Image (tube, rainbow, N blue to C red):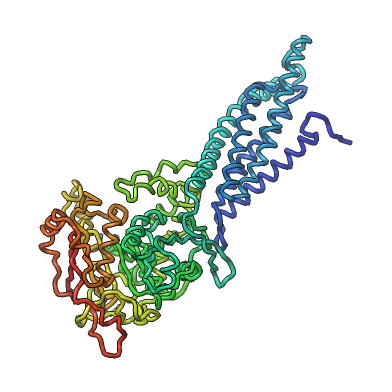
Amino acid sequence: MWHLRKHTVLSIPGLTLVALATAYGIAFLAYIGVSTKRNRIVRTNDYTSMWLTLLGLLLSIQALFVISAYRSANRYLYWTIPWMAYGGVMSVFALCVCGGYGSVHQGGAATWGVFWLLASCAIIAYAGKARRGYIVDRIMGIPEYHPRLAESRGRMLLYVALDNVFPWVTWTIGLFFGILVAVQALCLANDRRLYGVPGRLVPVQTHGGEYWFNLHVWCQGYGAREQASETPVFVLLADFGMPSTSMLGLAEGFAAAGHPACIIDRPGYGWSEPGYWMQDPVDVVKSINQALTKYPIANPIVLVGWGEGGVWAQMYMQAADYSRVIGVVLLDTYPNEEILQTFALNRTTTLQNLRQLRSASTTSTSPSVHFDAALERSASNLFSAWRAVSPLALHRARNSAWPGFQPQSALNMHRAMFRNNLYYQAKYFEYAGTGAALYRGLLSYVGSDTDAVLVYHHWPLRWPAFRQESGAAFSNASLKRRDGAPTAPASSAKIPVLVVASAKQFNSDCGVQGIGDAEQCTVWQAFAWFYYRQQIEYQQTLSQNAALLLCQGRVAEDNTECDVGFVWRRPGWLAQAIVSQLISQPAGTSSVASATSAEETNSAASSETSLESQTDSVASTQSTPSESSVESQFSASFATQSAFAETSITF
């Protein structure tokens, strides 16, 4: 009958470590399975606990190795001092993990770090005992190793190799991953200390109220006075992969102009929790609407979507409370840029895939449609890989270059949003394997009128026009509108829509774009034309009250040509320009155009020859006597901006 043998694996400490190693192993396998499981609520990056349990398993095995060699008849614990030093270092890492993740309220990760201490202390204790025992043996004249007690020479050589190779290999692995995990934990704690939640975490329900999570709403210039009025609130939705900090300058610009603005972090970005996976675009916009309501924001809103955020704004206008939306601004928005690019390259399968995608948009069980399967798989795998290694701090050097970012005071906070454990997980969730989930969801709302116009224009992509009831909840909201009947009434909506894009995106001059390769130049020229054409199609179909403005030239805030980064490079100027375009100004109030410098005006005027305002082909229908007082506030045309050119092209 066996019995507990002191100072061996069969001792109480040894059996405890066996149990701990078993628990770590089971948890490690469980977290691998959970990290790929879908249809569940997600609050953290599951790979964080996976890495912590893997390192805990390694530490437990190392502790068992040390105990098994201590007082063994045929083995010798080499490197006792390095073993003690290693145990001490790993104990420090354990404290860093506990303190770091504990300070950011990730109790599960902090708890796994606590158990590192048990294994680390066991390594220190038993390596110290072995060290003292061997010193005593030398004093007594006992040889340090007893090869005569090994069963064979081969077994003896195996013991020698194991006792010398195993420590160095496992030390290298443990120290490498241990320091990465500890650094990330400390950096997260420091980021939380420096950049606490600047807005408000609003609990929202998802999937019929079965689950809940927190969305971050960050408002500028929205206080009790604004809440008590019907002052329009600009609601900002950032581009794919961008946290709320990327539009902070624009929000502050709106607030400085006297108009409140709120930015919402979509699930997983910034300070918002990841939410439900797989993501349903309809459910996401309903969650955004809940966050606005619970904040609470009862005012009329103007949606400002940048890049893919503009597509989310379009989805909001179809699936959420569009009656409270009195205006929409789209900044460099495309329905799906990857699909548009494959079409621009004249891929023979694109039209067939588009037809399949439109037919599949009515059911969620239809197979996925891939426009460039290799590209989509590569992008999805890249996001998944970075999601997996985010807890190791390997991504902290990425996304650091933001030349000209405004406001400069928020640059470090902006960088920190790309370095947490959730950023790449948010991109992976939102990309959803193909990057077309949002566009596919929008297709189910496409009406026959809009579809007919786009077919007539021979345009492959589809999107729904805004609803006629848009903004109906606030009939007295003061946004500018246009008179004049539309030439092609693809939409019955009269909601003001401002489509803003960078003129450089449409410039086919490869020299200006810095493209020297002839083949790449041909590709870019195809992209540039389709980028521009897409904005025209938006203008002609989303609303009868739409305008297209091209951002070009230089301004004092950003002394460079207007590029795709104009949202964060010149946010103050952009905010004033949008306000001037949309908000009715009291008599005697100077506009942005009159406030700009003569140098800026001359610079823009020289580049507006082909982009000057023509007769707008998409304007508002004439007001009728029965319409509200808002209709009387239509402006004959939007004011011309110094670095904007208004354009309209009829196909």
Instruction: Please state, as top left, top right, bottom left or bottom right, where the N terminus lies in the image.
Output: top right
Q: Is residue 392 above or below residue 625?
A: above
Taking the spot 30% from the left edge, 45% from the top edge, the residue there is 403
Residue 231 position, x and y percent, is: 37, 71
Specify whether residue 449 is in view: no
Q: Is any part of residue 41 visible from this angle? A: yes
Query: Residue 442 in the image: x percent, y percent?
Result: 39, 71
637 sits to left or right of 470: left
Image quadrant where residue 68 sits: top right
User: Which of these two is toward me, 25 or 367?
Assistant: 25
Quarter of the figure with the C terminus: bottom left
Q: Is residue 29 above or below residue 307?
A: above
Horizontal arrangement in the rendering, residue 474 relative to residue 123 (left or right) = left
Left or right of 298 in this view: 497: left
Measured as percent of width and height from the top left, residue 622 is found at 22, 85
* Residue found farthest to the right: 1
How many marks on residues? 0
Give the residue at x 40% y 45%.
Answer: 412
Residue depicted at 59% across the width and 27% down the height = 168
**Residue 578, horizontal then vertical, whole percent:** 27, 65
